Amino acid sequence: MEQYQMKEIIIDHHFIGEESITADFTYNKQDYSVTFHKSDLEVLNMWVLKEGTSLPANLSDELIHALREEVQQRM
């Protein structure tokens, strides 16, 4: 798997009535944003960020697992 670069992690205490964590990162020269439930780190949404817009992203399970591990370590 090609390496990703984490840009920032944001904890939101009011997203859909539950705490969530958003991880913004670069992967394959593209910017992405993935939001997880804070309680169990299940994915809420994934976006690829292009030219000022966000589009649904399709990321591998392997990459999502790596992101979860990094988010958990940083919490």
Image (tube, rainbow, N blue to C red):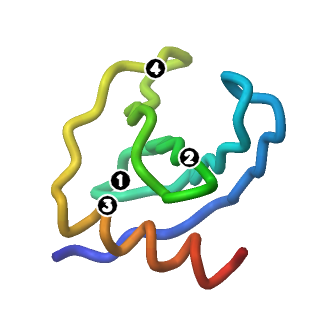
> Which numbered disc, 1 or 2, marks the residue that appears first in the sequence?
1
Vertical relation: 16 (above or below) 20: above
Task: Report, in whole angstroms, how far the alpha carbon at label 1 lies from the one at label 2.
Answer: 26 Å
> Which numbered disc, 3 or 2, marks the residue that appears first in the sequence?
2
Instruction: Identify the residue at image location x=45%, y=78%.
Output: 69
* Label 1: element kind: loop
Q: Neighbour class for label 2 at 10 Å: few (<14), some, many (≥20)?
A: some
Q: Position of residue 70 (x, y in %)?
A: 52, 77
* Label 2: element kind: strand
> Which numbered disc, 2 or 4, marks the residue that appears first in the sequence?
2
> Which numbered disc, 3 or 1, marks the residue that appears first in the sequence?
1
What residue is shown with label 2? Answer: 37
What residue is shown with label 1? Answer: 29
Q: Quadrant of the C terminus?
A: bottom right
Q: Tell me the kind of residue under disc 2.
A: His
Mark carried by residue 64: 3
> Which numbered disc, 4 or 1, marks the residue that appears first in the sequence?
1
> Which numbered disc, 4 or 3, marks the residue that appears first in the sequence?
4
